[in-house]
Amino acid sequence: MTKAVIKGTGIGADFTYEQLSDLLTSTGREVRLFRTMSTEEYQSITDNNNTFIPYDFAMEMKWFAKREEDCKEWARRLEMLGEGESRVFVAITVLKKALSFMFYSEKLDGVGAAYSADVDLLNKIVRRVDLL
């Protein structure tokens, strides 16, 4: 049975292997997206070869800002830095064509453009994770 082409859901299971297979290795224009996360989440990614790991009490979808400034604004608005908790800002690098598989919001929370994806999709499209 062939899967229908469903663009923009951000859910890895919605896409076939053929649709996603070259997004880590082929050449093309790359873009960076930005996210703030706990130091523990960042450590879990780096400890697992830049692989995103699902964990209890985490949102299914991971949101990434199109601009670094917007990422920092969301962190401020959501008061993401709780007592005794530390946060880091990261950038992920994906091929520009990978964005068409991610869910897109033009003005998330009234701040700015953002993309989201589940960990299954992220692990098939993220080429690099950089600490900012």
Image (spheres, helix red, strand yellow):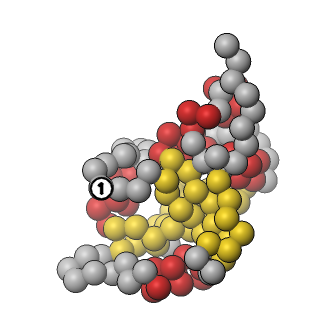
Residue 83 location (% of width, % of height):
22, 83
Secondary structure at numbered mark 1: loop
Q: Residue at x 37, y 78 (%)?
A: 80
Comparing 77 with 64, the one in front is: 77
Q: How many marks?
A: 1
Q: Is residue 4 left or right of residue 81?
A: right
User: What is the crowding at mark 1: few (fewer than 14 residues within 10 Å), some, or many (at least 20)?
Assistant: few
* Residue 95 visible from this viewpoint: no
Image: 128 above or below 66: above
Q: Is residue 58 visible?
A: yes
Q: Is residue 11 left or right of residue 99?
A: left
- Residue depicted at 57% across the width and 64% down the height: 64
At which x and y percent is residue 17? 64, 26
Q: Residue at x 63, y 60 (%)?
A: 115
Q: Position of residue 101 (x, y in %)?
A: 69, 45
Residue furthest out toward the top: 1
**89 up-or-down from 40: above or below:** below
Q: Residue at x 68, y 39 (%)?
A: 23
Q: Position of residue 106 (x, y in %)?
A: 71, 69
Kindly identify which residue carries mark 1.
Answer: 57
The N terminus: image quadrant: top right
Query: Relative to residue 92, is residue 126 depicted above or below?
Result: above
Using the rendered view, name the quadrant where residue 92 is placed. Answer: bottom right
Question: Which amino acid type is shown beneath numbered disc 1?
Answer: Phe
Q: Residue furthest left?
A: 84
User: 28 left or right of 47?
Assistant: right
